Image: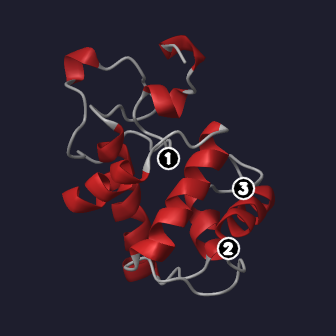
Amino acid sequence: MTGSDKTRGIRNNNPGNIRWGDDWKGLVPQAQRTDKSFCQFTGPEYGIRAMIIILRNYQRKYGLKTIDGIIRRWAPPNENDTAAYIKSVALATGTDADKPIDLSDSRKLFPLLQAIIKHENGSQPYEFDVFVRALDLV
């Protein structure tokens, strides 16, 4: 896959398509940024790290414990087909959309990350070790 064949999220090492805002660890230097809307990270583990922090904050700060609640906030209906997104993630993780999941457990967290990445980008190209490195950076 060449750079031009990759989706925006994969090209940006931002597979969750996180918008600019917070000063995340691992962002490319400002002079090298080419995407005005979405964060660009130096490696995919930094983009996935940001996803982990955001998703865990949804649980801790906002009490969003289900795929339904998490995805409604992650992918609001004004920008997404949120119902299809929820269905896709629930199916990919094998978890009912309204059943609580514990994102402090990597056995639940990694499948959720993989499902979001696949939905956002059409594929999930990362090996397991990338997720482990991302979690180690949190």
Position of the N terminus by quadrant: top right
Name the element at disc 1. Answer: loop
Q: Residue at x 72, y 57 (%)?
A: 85
Location of mark 3 (residue): 77
What residue type is disc 3 on?
Answer: Pro
| Sequence-first disc among 3 and 2 | 2
Residue 38 picture quarter: top left
* Residue 25 position within the rendered picture, expressed as x and y whole percent measured from the top left: 20, 45
Label 1 crowd bin: few (<14), some (14–19), many (20+), radius 10 Å: many
Residue 16: mark? 1
What residue type is disc 1 on?
Answer: Gly
Name the element at disc 2. Answer: helix
What residue type is disc 2 on?
Answer: Asp
Whether residue 138 is visible to the viewer of this picture, yes or no, is no
Tag in front: 1 or 3: 1
Whether residue 109 is visible to the viewer of this picture, yes or no, is yes
| Sequence-first disc among 1 and 3 | 1
Mark 3–mark 2 distance (CA, rounded to whole Å) = 12 Å
Mark 1–mark 3 distance (CA, rounded to whole Å) = 16 Å
Q: Residue at x 32, y 58 (%)?
A: 132
Name the element at disc 3. Answer: loop
